[in-house]
Image (tube, coloured by chain):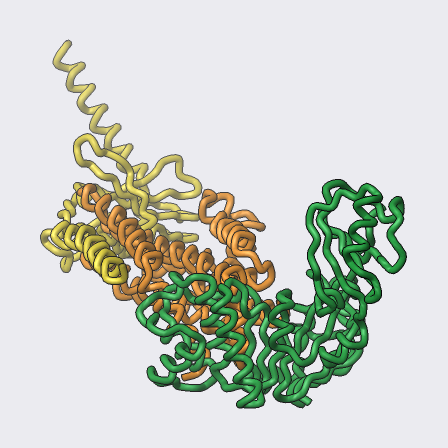
Amino acid sequence: MNPVTLIARKESGELLGSGRGLGWMLALSVILSVLALLLVSNTELSLLDNAQVVYMVMGTITALGGLLAIVLGSDAIAGERERGTLIPLLLTPITTTHIVLGKMGGLVAAWVLMYALSLPYLWAVGSSGQNLAQAIAYLALFGTPVVLGFGFYAVGLSARFGNVRTALLTALISLILLASPLLLGPSLRQSAIGQAFDAVNPFSAALNTFDSVVIDSQPLGMQLGRLAVTLAWLALTFWFAKRSAQTMEI
Amino acid sequence: MKPYSVLFALIGALLLSGATRAAAPVDISLTPAARNPAQPEMGNWLKFHSAIKNTGSQTLSGLVVWISLVQVDPGKEQPVDLEDWSAHKAVMRSALKPGESFSVDWPIRLIQAGNYRVVISAAERNAGTIFASPFADFNVKRKPTVESKRILPVAIGIPLLIAAYTGWRLRRRG
Amino acid sequence: MLIEIADVKLSLRGNPILNGVRLSMREGEIYGLLGPNGAGKSTTLAVLTGLRQADSGTIRVLGLDPARQRRELHHQMGVLAEDSGFYGWMNAPDYLRWMGRLYGREIPAEEAARRLAQVGLEGVARKAVGGFSRGMKQRLGLARALLTDPRLLILDEPTNGLDPRGRREIHDVLLALSRDRNVGILLCTHLLDDVDRLCSRIGIIHQGETLLEGNLAELLAEKTGANRYRLRLGKRVSAAGEVLPAGVKAVAREGGWLHLDLAPSLCPNTVWSALFASGWDIIEIHNEGSGLEALYLELTKTEVAA
């Protein structure tokens, strides 16, 4: 078995079999349940409101996925260093790239589980509305590179800082910065700076795509530019993580 | 003399109304499409046909024709933002000669339940008034968008399942 | 030669950490690397294992360049770093087997049990490593270092946290490896008793430089001749202010203790009587012998405060 798979399996086992990982899944399901129960209490919804709720669930999953990614990523290298397990790893024949990819393998497993957990909720709120199949497909297509990109970014910070708290704080601030345009009103986002930021922001790219596809029923062809943004984010953050791990001080 | 003054008032009113009709050079019709569902509900598409004709003696310039929708449920009367109902909200004709007419189809996606009134309006560059078609009323039935029988089991069941599994795992490890 | 390094220099952020380290070691030797805290021992080990790259100097470990051939080197070397950690949720056999897979080895359960027994960890198969004592973790770390049946073992404080019996057991394991399998062992430790018992060769590093290196017995015979004593004093004595008898030399002060070297010709009781008569407030007197500690302290001495 290659080292990446070995480390990924260990990470998955530790995360998903431990109290911490299961607690995270429980928290996620509670958040989604609260969203869904709020919906049940409102009987005056229009067709559009239903699509809005599906969009909200997709956005929530992506945001929570990003948050999980930076929590796990920040611990990836710095946590091993603080627990004294990094040196034994580096004293085996594996490389720092193996460690980065293996750690990300664990995150992929966690994201897959989160995505699977979201499907019953999407079905429950969206099956009598519009574009449910597209919602499921686009959550995977756009949510995955955004979430994994945050993971790589946090792993890179973890390697650079060598300290979990610093890496996590920096990653959280970055996540909030990237999410901030979505908290602003539409008029602010229409400014030149707002539009420029929106154009390169992977988080915006994913959420705007969800809006376009689920609410406005736009086809894939109109989302290719945004898909390119999310894939570029993934590639850039992978390079950052790899480079940071290779040049980190032991 | 009183009966003669009433007669003259009546004749005057008739002449005046005729003069008013003669001053409206645009005739707009509005008819629902034959294929519209008899009892439309949320998510359905409705189509309305309009024929806009220049009934005046002068060419109409810069003619804009648009669709308006109003909700007329008692207590909920309000204009409807057509943003999500229709992508086809207006047409423009630079010139319409006397006697000339053109047709427009107005497709609408029914987003919300309720009672609605649709009207087609037109404005011309030189005219001092808006021209309107007759109204067309329709009712949109509510389609259940929220299935509580679906949501409740998921919203309650999934957290319970995960909590139970977590408890079993931790007990097994301990 | 298993290890051959000469004139190794390394600076970090402009600060010189290693400033001329040398070390040579053969197969089957147990080499003790000594030095005060901050001397550069851990950095030297990092250079030997390829975790850090030296700025200059010649470095060959098992005939390989650690900076460029790290992966090949790690297949032949076992390392126990100081304070190295474990995955607390795993049990010991699973941990060894997982680490073995990182080396490309599939370790059967029986072999894992045997390796654990070799370091004195029988009967712990079901217990999570997170519940191990410090001494148990040290033993597990040693088992991990031995996974590849290495030609070279590098051990940083391997008996940390072990009780005297545990230390003796580990000593026996290391001696057997050296004697029976010709494994070279580089031992980095503060415990001079361990060095005395195990090492045939030592090197002393101070302030990033190798002060002394060679066969332990030869070095001791050559460098020390004086008898070393350690005195605990009731009140602080200034060596400059007090006159010491001829043949008595103050070597170092550590807290309330004063280390004195007495020339071999002097009778210690005569010296103590003279000091008492001079008004020295001596509470305890210990004979340090003419061994390794004396040599170590001599080479890495602190200045006696005025």
Please provide percent x and percent y for residue B99: 31, 52
Q: Colour of chain C?
A: green
The reply, left or right, for residue C179 in relation to residue A68 is right
Residue at the spot 16% in from the left edge and 47% down from the top edge = B140
Residue at the spot 12% in from the left edge and 13% down from the top edge = B3
Residue extending farthest left: B38
Please provide percent x and percent y for residue B121: 31, 43
Colour-to-chain, yellow: B
Q: Quadrant of residue B162?
A: bottom left
- Foreground of the two, A185 or A160: A160
Residue at the spot 60% in from the left edge and 71% down from the top edge = C194
Q: What quarter of the picture does the N terminus of chain C occupy?
A: bottom right
Q: Colour of chain A?
A: orange
The reply, left or right, for residue B50 in relation to residue C40 is left
Q: Quadrant of residue C121?
A: bottom left
Question: Is residue B101 visible to the viewer in this orientation of the structure?
Answer: no
Residue at the spot 82% in from the left edge and 44% down from the top edge = C277
The reply, left or right, for residue A95 in relation to residue C285 is left
Please provide percent x and percent y for residue C11: 76, 67
